[in-house]
Image (cartoon, coloured by chain):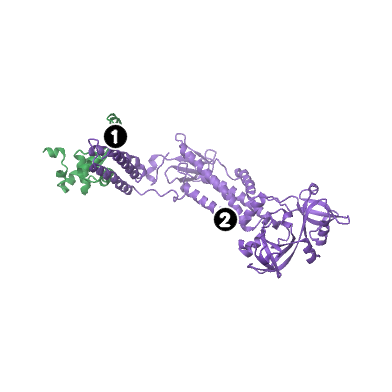
Chain colours: A purple, B green
Amino acid sequence: MTRLADVILRAAHLAFLSCASWLVPPAQRQEWRREWTSELSYARQTCAPAQTLSWRGAHKLTCFCLGSFQDAVCLRRMEPKERVSSVFELGSARRCILWLGAIVVCCAVIAHYLPGIRSQNDAAQKPPNAGVILIESAQGGQKLDSLIPFQAYRNWTSVRQQFFTRLAFYWTENLPASGAAKDHRKWRVAHASNDLFAVVGVEPPTDAADTGNDAGLPRAVLSRSAWRRQFDSSPAVIGATASVAGRQVRIVGIAPDDTWRLPEKPDLWILESDAKMARESPHASGYVIAQLSSEGRGMMIGDAVRISSFTPNGGAIDLFGATLAIPASGTFSLYAFAFFLAILAMPAVTSVFQSESELASRRLSFRNRVRGWVFLGAKIGLVTALGYFGATDVAYGWFAGYSPSAELLQVIGSFGICLAGLRWAVMDQCRRCPVCLRMVTHPAQVGIASSNFLGWYGTEMVCMGGHALLHVPNLPTSWFSRQRWTYLDKSWDFLFATAAGRF
Amino acid sequence: MQAMGADPKLSHTAAMILQAIHAGYKYGFGIMEMTGLPSGTVYPAMRRLERDRLIRSQWENQSIADAQQRPARKYYKLTAAGLTSLEAARHRYPLLDRLIPTEERAAR
């Protein structure tokens, strides 16, 4: 056999033994690998006394190495049944984390698909223009009516205004609509100025190309909720035509949810020129949306402004303007606030230092202490995540879109879940064995209520891993006020089937 | 665990291994060579015998192996229970002595 073949064979034999050792139960793995490797060395000396290995000897050694796999399988069979994975052990730390994680993931998936959460976060990322107001008529400083006659709006647009840079108008009516829509009830239809969306400051609707016979039809924008409700969120609706009260319109886009902050919440916005509105509905009354000039912004007090509009004949009309910019906080900032409140309230509902241990001579190993803290941290992390996702699921599952009530519900839900969850995390830790982190079980009442408070009276629970006993006083006294751990030594092992991993 | 010293029903393989150890073949590979059994049979059988306390194993002193520049070796010895079992097995398998003669029997 050549030297190269010998080297390759030697490496292959060691690799065989190494692979076989991984089949051996972990507790015996190193021992068996050592024995096989050692024996291989002596077997090699026997088969190749003159340092030159024959093919026959190589075959013998290979059989020896392959036999190690059979050994390993046999050893594995002989090994007593392995302990049930701690994931399946009742009260184990892994099981607890797995359950919590599963709940958090479910809540996160639900939150991902709730449209209200998305729109709320979008609104927080893109705050509405603070200079956009809804104009209402006023007299003597008091607002009268939100509805403004179209003619008044026309008069204001025909002269240069001191306090406004742009104005837009819309009015609404209920009309029967048809097309691809599923529901043929009357829709709330708004007839709006062409530049309404630009004035409001939301994303302008996607403009589908004018093609074929549809060119020249009035443009219409669907509300997002109508798009979902009537058209199952189909993208094919863009560019399609719809019939509104027998009149054909071309749908050019979907309005963002922010637009719903405009009064009346129309299902469909038909964009028309002011000239057409003047021709077809000169006596309509609707809403005027204005973009304030820098001078107009300077007059704002809070979210309102009292200004004047000027008519072509030089007269001034008192107006009241209310901002459309509803301060949306975003779900996360609301949650952060609720979480902060829950942290502040924590000391009122639980004590972090609930236990003491009699470990004067036997300290927990560093590894076990780290494991305990990591477990507590993981629980707190998952509970706080649950506080966010669970509360937003409840709030925006109940309210389909943005609503101050949804925000309130989210804050209350987050606070409640975080407070209860953090309390649970701490209390749960107090009922877990510091060594194996399993829940202590088998509560036993010990002693009887003492009339002179000198007799111990409480509940004892035991770790099924055989590591510790937990004593919880039913009647806290000055000498035994908090729960205590007593660690069990090896003499207790015979009582527990799975006593292992001690300190 | 109960020792199998009094149990006469030792398998032929186990009896051969006991006989080989008794004959002075103290190492796994040597026992394989002597008995002709493959490694996949010998080691698990020895593991069972050790579990039943018929044999016991021990690693040789590492310093001795290091001094001789070779890997340390694990050797096996019969226990008193193992010897009793072997005696019983010899009655059960009369050819065992002829297959693997021990020194004292070979000397007779």
Q: Give SS at disc 1.
A: loop
Furthest residue toward left: B108
Residue type marked 2 = Ile
Task: Give coordinates of residue A451: x percent, y percent.
Answer: 53, 43
Q: Position of residue A438 (x, y in %)?
A: 46, 46
Look at label 1 and name its amino acid. Answer: Ala
* Number of other residues with Cα within 10 Å of mark 1, as a class: few under 14, some 14 to 19, many 20 or more: many
Q: Looking at the rendering, which quadrant does residue A55 occupy?
A: top left
Q: Which residue is mark 2?
A: A110
Who's the residue at 32% across and 38% down the image?
A: A34
Q: Chain of mark 1?
A: B
User: Is the residue B23 above or below the residue A332 in the image?
Assistant: above
Q: Is residue B66 left or right of residue A110?
A: left
Labels 1 and 2 within one chain: no
Q: Secondary structure at mark 2?
A: helix
Q: Which mark is residue A470?
A: none
Q: How many marks?
A: 2
Percent coordinates x, y for residue B31 in the rendering: 22, 41
Q: Position of residue A234 (x, y in %)?
A: 61, 62
* Cα distance in 3D space between marks 1 and 2: 62 Å
Q: Which residue is mark 1?
A: B72
Chain under label 2?
A
Residue in the foreground of this view, choosing between A147 and A339 = A147
Q: Quadrant of the C terminus of chain A?
A: top left
Q: Nearer the viewer, residue A156 or A399?
A: A156
Residue most toward the top?
Answer: B67
Vertical placement of residue A320 versus A244, above or below: above
Q: Is residue B102 visible?
A: yes
Image position of A266 (left or right of A363): right
